Image (cartoon, rainbow, N blue to C red):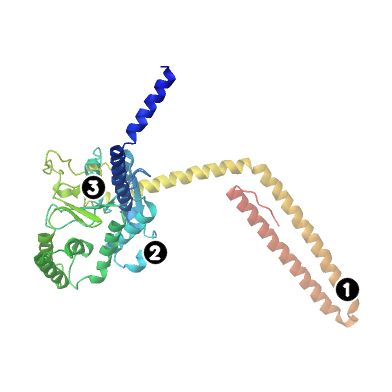
Amino acid sequence: MNRSYKKDSIAKSTLSTMFRPSILLKLMAVAAWLTPNIASATANGDTREQHSMKIHMVVVADNNFQSKYEALFERMESFANRHEYLWHIIGSSEDDSCHQKFKEFFFRKHCMVADWAGRKTNPGDKIFVFDADVVPFRPQTPLDYWLEMSEDLIFYDRTWNNEIMAGNYMIRNVPRALAFLNEWAQYEYKRPPGFSSADNGAIHLHLAETLFRNSESDTTKTDLDICSLKYQNLTESVENLDPYFSYVGCTREIVPAGSYSIDDLSIRIAKKNTAWVMDGVFDSYDGHQVESEASLPLPIFHHGVKINNFEEDSWKYVTYNLTIPVSKDEKTKKDEDEDNVRAEETIEANDDMHLELDEETIRAHQMLHQKRHEEAIEANQMLHQKKMKEEEGTDLKLDEETTQAYRIVNQKRHEERFEANQMLHQNRQEGTESTLF
């Protein structure tokens, strides 16, 4: 038996084994399992096979706040660059439609984030949204721990009370999560007449409604109705917070910290001190540190870092390694130094152009004399023609016209000489060439 025959026999045996009915059925079953799972992943916005997921850090701030918190934004951008995230400032002119829909910033913010994320990020990207008064405190720590969480939205409990924090959260770019933000913004039109803490109050009822409005439990639905009524009946001012915190407590009975999933949306509410950001006054300013489980990283960012002026907030510049602003006196001195340098450069330029300016002076005077000569000839011709036409009895009138004509010529010469001198003086001052006449 030759080697060629052996190879053919082996090949036929292998093909025969592969195409046995049992093997074919198994292969078809695997293919059937893969197809819907791939389709499901694509439908849910998980397109990492098509592109690598990007991590975005964003803040919504108009020009005034961009200037006020410039030092904080510099640190945020530095943190993003260090860990290969993308830093963005969503400005006030980013989207006109949100400005038209919502008058109050705190509701408009979430509309702007949803619109920006839908236009500027890829499906599946994760976006960490921050308030303007947030700054890194532990910049060496990346966001990895929270990036491993699979939920589409992540909020967290405040340290000092029972509220869910509204200003800082994570959202994944999937359609239902973006819709959640737009629905949240709509609470501007549902606000009660009294103090409700704007979007921070609204997020509690919005989460409860989103997660449990279609609950099969009649008790849960009843509790939700009670919380909704408490929200609508908030009539007290900020001086009396009892009704507000009663409403918040009502909603927290329905949505305590934990992970939730409904249909095509998943939401996590992180426990106190377990998120990537916390109110800074409860962390380690004075030597004590917030307690954290051994497996959890400490919060990276501090919230509530207000910047007014360097004299009052100098310790914040030290604590957070902020760029120290230039004082008005230093800025004035710097501007004066720059002006002096520019003046010296102008003098040097004028010296270099001295000969050229002198040549232009000569040329200007030559042109002035030429114009004067031509105007004098023209005036004499006009007077001569008039004399020829006038009768002998009008000699006195002609003499008056002659005098007036010469006065006009002399006045024009004076004005032109003055104008030429001004232009030449300006040329010397600016150190630039100018074409006269």
| Quadrant position of residue 102 | bottom left
Most foreground residue, 379 or 176: 176
**Tag shown at residue 96:** 2
Is residue 125 in sight in this rendering? no
Residue 258, position as x, y percentages in the image:
14, 52
Sequence-wise, which precedes: disc 2 or disc 3?
A: 2
Question: As displayed, is residue 5 above or below residue 223?
Answer: above
At label 1, the amino acid type is Gln
At label 2, the amino acid type is Asp
For mark 1, what is the residue? 385
Of the 4 image quadrants, the one containing the N terminus is: top left
Contact flag, marks 2 and 3 (Cβ < 8 Å): no
Neighbor class of circle 2 (other Cα within 10 Å; few <14, some 14-19, many 20+) is few
| Quadrant position of residue 223 | bottom left
Circle 2 or circle 3, nearest the eye: 3
- Secondary element under disc 3, as helix, strand or loop, is loop
Sequence-wise, which precedes: disc 1 or disc 2?
A: 2
At label 3, the amino acid type is Ser
Of the 4 image quadrants, the one containing the C terminus is: bottom right
Neighbor class of circle 3 (other Cα within 10 Å; few <14, some 14-19, many 20+) is few
**Tag shown at residue 150:** 3
Marks 1/2: CA distance? Answer: 73 Å
**Tag shown at residue 104:** none
- Secondary element under disc 1, as helix, strand or loop, is helix
Residue 150, position as x, y percentages in the image:
23, 47
Circle 1 or circle 2, nearest the eye: 2
The residue lying at 62 percent from left, 52 percent from top is: 425
